[in-house]
Amino acid sequence: MANKKIKIVANKNSYEDLATFKSINELNETVRTYKERYKDQLNKTDIAVLNILHSHSAKYTGVSFLTKNNIAKMVGRTRRTIINICNKLESLGILRQYATKRKSDMQQTSNAITILPIQESEQEVKNEENNQNFTQETQKISHQKNNIFLKQIHNINHLNMTQTSKRTPYIKLVPKHLQHYQAFFGDKIKTLYGRIWLAMKKLGVHIDKDIMQTIAHIAFDKLVKYIKEGRNLTAEQMNKIVYTIAYNQLSEREDTKEIVKDQQAITRALRLLDKPSENKKLPSLSLFADVISV
């Protein structure tokens, strides 16, 4: 009976329809962001499974169709463990699993597993659920035979269509993967994102924009947590919090702290070279070398 409910046939066209990314770069950036965002919730085995799904999602970008048994063999765990991990990743909004069937006998085969884009995992899934609930309610109402009541429902539907047709405005200079934070910060998100880059400028370094976006996710998630806890933060307080988190992240992350350290050493050395202009004595080259090696 359960097999009759499976609508997706495992073939090329289905996998192409399920593809969630336009390019490998978008997929890579999304997986990297998920690992950073949920680093406190994902253990080594969870990460290993995500890496396998990621590496087998290139042909149809974002879609893999490995069996749970094969994934289990790759990570050295049981099939039940892999099922639990996939369900965990799905609950976090990182992926979605689709039951599929073979065309030859229409029997169930391995699931198609898609890695979800950031916005879909947080906002669009909620919107989809809301739309489904709304559709179910309107279907119940449509069975009513009272003509006057049906006219009222028609007017309500018209108003709802007008409201849902309005899209959240796109904030310029803010990456699309951060746009959903408007739900919490409104147009302040532009200033908050600017504080992320101000921290980099303060440290006098140039960091890859993908890393800066990841740091922004960390800082914004922290603010959202405060907001959900009921804290009343002023705009100035939010700016300071975001700036401090970004500054600390750049100074402490494994992939940026060496860049910051080297750049600060060079800056100190150049300042030492400039200072002697007052007494007309230049420091020796060995002093410069000592500073660089700090």
Image: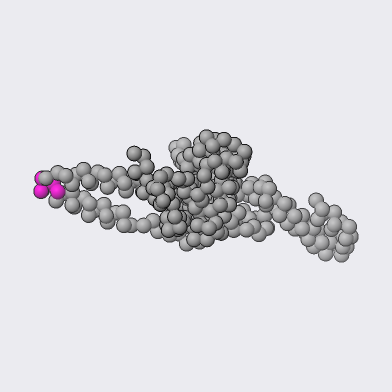
Q: As rendered, which of 269 and 141 lies closer to the eye?
A: 141
Furthest toward the front, the residue is 104
- In this picture, which residue range is highlighted in magenta? 146-150
Across and down, in percent, residue 151 comes to 14, 51
Q: Is residue 147 magenta?
A: yes
- Position of residue 267 in the picture relative to residue 121 (left or right): right
**Residue at point 36% right, 57% down?**
167
In the rendered image, is residue 239 in sight? no
Quadrant, the N terminus: top left
Q: Quadrant of residue 207?
A: bottom right
As drawn, 49 above or below 203: above
**Residue at point 81% right, 55% down?**
292
Q: How many marks?
A: 0
In the rendered image, is residue 4 in sight? yes
The secondary structure that dominates the magenta segment is helix
Across and down, in percent, residue 217 comes to 54, 49
Q: As rendered, which of 94 and 210 lies closer to the eye?
A: 94
**Residue at point 41% right, 51% down?**
104
Across and down, in percent, residue 143 comes to 16, 44
Q: Is residue 32 magenta?
A: no
**Residue at point 42% right, 49% down?**
102
Across and down, in percent, residue 241 comes to 56, 45
- Position of residue 220 in the picture relative to residue 253 (left or right): left
